């Protein structure tokens, strides 16, 4: 019989994953179950295999369950941050254009975007808590008698974290909002794709979601993950950067990125002007 | 002073890249895929430049 000490981490892990699981189920209900039920109620699913429909609808829950039971690592991150959001969007992307247009109103996109954001935030938070728990309790720090209530380095960190939160919220809200609610974008799709406009809109929403997942992984989660690892890599890089900074010049990657941005901007102008 | 300049510039570039991504979406809607891909590259490059400047701002704090 397992003792209390061995049971405690499992209990903590269950409690930690409860919120992401609840938010994932909420996203599934908003983006998959309700539209499917509304479509079935409106008899808009004629000709679609019921077994296939049930399978496609339940696949996201399978990914969510796999993400819950997998050990923490890249496989779990892929299941929760990539597979589940993509599978949630798949039924609407695969549904006939007129079904999506008739059943899903524009405001539902906003609700789905907010649910997706809440879910992604919950997963990231659970991962951060799990890593912090694995690191154990922090070492005792000697405190001075006279010091600011919030040290300046913590103010700086809090500023950075708030900036990351704003970026993490702002990007998907603006991009998914633009795809789902921007009238001129809907008009462009209507003009370009005609009867398939709703399907193209769903496809664009999936593409924008995937783009955001890649950006989130590379520019938000990677720095936070490095911080949780006590910034060993970052400290090494900073030491190297300090040596560079003393020369007053940025790294070569900066010049490459500036050059790529300028060349592609010129290419866009040229492509539009010709 | 340089630190704040780099921080503000990094923020402007990172948020500014959103504009390129929006234009990318706009061109996708018009089925102008070449312009959309080019704008995607511009957005990623601009966000990368912003990240580099944020790194410089971090180094400047000392």
Image (cartoon, coloured by chain):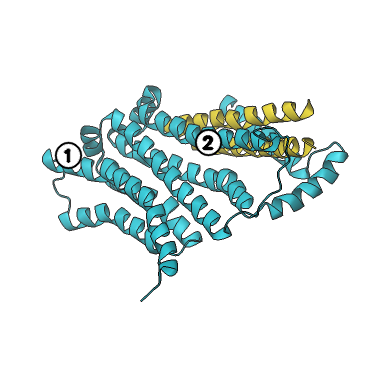
Chain colours: A cyan, B yellow
Task: Calculate the distance from the C-alpha at mark 1 to the C-alpha at mark 2.
Answer: 34 Å
Depth order, front residue of B18/A8:
A8
Location of the N terminus of chain A by quadrant is bottom left
Q: Earlier in the sequence, mark 1 or mark 2?
A: 1
In the picture provided, is A161 more to the left or to the right than B53? left
Q: Quadrant of the C terminus of chain A?
A: top right
A246 relative to A71 in the view: left or right: right
In the image, farthest residue toward the bottom? A1
Q: Which residue is drawn at the image coordinates 44% and 32% (left, top)?
A: A173
Nearer to me, A12 or A62: A12
Tell me the chain of label 1.
Answer: A
Horizontally, is A255 left or right of A2 in the view?
right
x and y, in percent, of residue B61 in the image: 77, 35
Residue drawn at x 38%, y 49% is A20
Taking depth in this image into account, of A236 and A194 the one nearest to the observer is A236
Give residue B36's position: percent from left, percent from top.
Answer: 52, 35
Query: What residue sits 77% from the left and 39% below the top?
Result: B59
- Give me the chain letter of mark 2: A
Query: Is residue A89 in view from this perspective?
Result: no
Q: Is residue A258 left or right of residue A207?
A: right
Q: Which mark is residue A38?
A: 1
The residue indicated by pointer 2 is A165
Residue A203, x across and y down, in percent: 37, 42
């Amino acid at each position: 019989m397992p003792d209390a000490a061995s049971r405690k981490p499992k209990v903590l892990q269950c409690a930690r994953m409860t919120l992401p699981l609840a938010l994932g189920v909420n996203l599934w209900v908003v983006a998959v179950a309700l539209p499917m039920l509304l479509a079935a109620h409106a008899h808009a699913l004629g000709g679609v295999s019921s077994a296939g429909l049930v399978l496609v609808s339940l696949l996201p829950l399978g990914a969510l369950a796999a993400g819950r039971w997998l050990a923490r690592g890249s496989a779990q991150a892929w299941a929760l941050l990539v597979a589940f959001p993509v599978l949630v969007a798949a039924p609407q992307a695969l549904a006939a254009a007129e079904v999506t247009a008739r059943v899903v109103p524009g405001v539902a996109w906003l609700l789905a975007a907010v649910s997706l954001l809440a879910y992604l935030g919950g997963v990231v938070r659970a991962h951060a808590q799990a890593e912090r728990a694995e690191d154990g309790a922090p070492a005792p720090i000697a405190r001075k008698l006279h010091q600011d209530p919030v040290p300046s380095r913590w103010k700086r960190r809090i500023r950075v974290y708030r900036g990351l939160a704003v970026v993490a919220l702002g990007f998907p809200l603006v991009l998914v909002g633009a795809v789902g609610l921007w009238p001129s974008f809907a008009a462009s799709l209507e003009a370009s794709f005609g009867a398939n406009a709703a399907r193209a809109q769903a496809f664009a929403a999936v593409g924008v979601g995937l783009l955001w997942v890649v950006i989130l992984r590379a520019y938000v989660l990677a720095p936070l993950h490095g911080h949780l690892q006590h910034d060993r890599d970052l400290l090494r890089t900073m030491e190297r950067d300090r040596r560079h900074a003393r020369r007053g010049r940025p790294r070569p990657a900066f010049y490459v990125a500036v050059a790529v941005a300028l060349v592609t901007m010129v290419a866009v102008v040229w492509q539009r002007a010709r | 002073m340089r630190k704040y300049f780099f921080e503000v510039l990094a923020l402007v570039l990172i948020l500014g890249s959103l504009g390129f991504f929006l234009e990318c979406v706009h061109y996708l809607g018009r089925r102008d895929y070449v312009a959309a891909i080019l704008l995607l590259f511009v957005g990623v490059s601009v966000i990368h430049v912003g990240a580099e400047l944020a790194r410089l701002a971090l180094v400047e704090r000392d």
